[in-house]
Amino acid sequence: MSQAKKAALTLLALLLISPPIIVSGQKDKAGETIETLPQRPRAVTQRQFYEMQVSMEQLRRQMNELRIAVEAYKSRELSPEVYRTLLNRLKPPRMTHEIVLTNGTIVRGNIISEDINQVTLETSLGNLTLNKSTVRSIGEMADFKPKIDFLGDAREELYDEHRIYSGRVRNEGITRGDFVRVIFRLWSAETNLLAVDSSFVDGSNMSYISGVFTDTSIGPGKDAGYRVQVSVPKGRAVSYITREIHLEQVD
């Protein structure tokens, strides 16, 4: 057999043994066919997906933070009374405990359940459960409120139709007191209320998120003066006085 016939038979055998390759074609602008090989489907692994529970929890927190920010922004146009009502509605849970973790992290919240293995707290971002093996210490938090008291007795100025009481107050708490107001009441010997009046203290300047600007705030460790004028009814004898302090906490 000649060499040419052998080569032809070998090529024919290879074509019969090899699997067919299926191609798809499309024509270009010149009308010529362009052949393309089929693409293999990409393998999808489990690592390409996130845990739905974690993603949904993060989404809920972000939506809640956005809602609070939007409502706070809208409250700029509201009156102070409506603004304070809105703040009370958005107020986070009261934090009563402080937990120090073994890595130095401090977690603050309100303990709602605890056993030998774990402790669950209510925080501003939701409930959080900690393993006791990661906890270094658990303690009660100090009361995060202003504590404003009078500094000594008031100075009293007597006039025919009114009295003036002046003095100073001090904030011994660890948070700022806002709209601090001093009230004086005058009483008769029969414990009848004769007169009452009040005045805001001469405190620090403060601009709130609502757009309100005042000078009636007292920061921690600071003091401020007050001066209250109380009108006295003619012919009524004042036997004793009482005084008190009113305040608010505004962000």
Image (tube, rainbow, N blue to C red):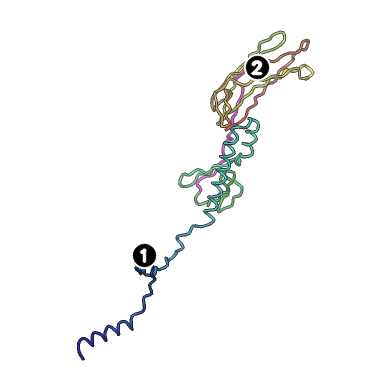
Residue picked out by circle 1: 28
Q: Position of residue 167 (x, y in %)?
A: 61, 17
How far is the residue under mark 2 from the one under mark 1?
A: 94 Å
The secondary structure type at the circle numbered 2 is strand
Q: Position of residue 61 (x, y in %)?
A: 55, 47
Does the stretch in magenta take in 95? Answer: no
Q: Nearer the viewer, residue 2 or 238?
A: 2
The three-letter amino acid code for the residue at tag 2 is Val
The three-letter amino acid code for the residue at tag 1 is Asp
| Numbered badge on residue 228 | 2
Outermost bottom residue = 1
Q: Position of residue 208 (x, y in %)?
A: 56, 30
The secondary structure type at the circle numbered 1 is loop
- Mark 2 packing: few (<14 Cα in 10 Å), some, or many (20+)? many
Range shown magenta: 135-152
Q: Position of residue 213 (x, y in %)?
A: 57, 25
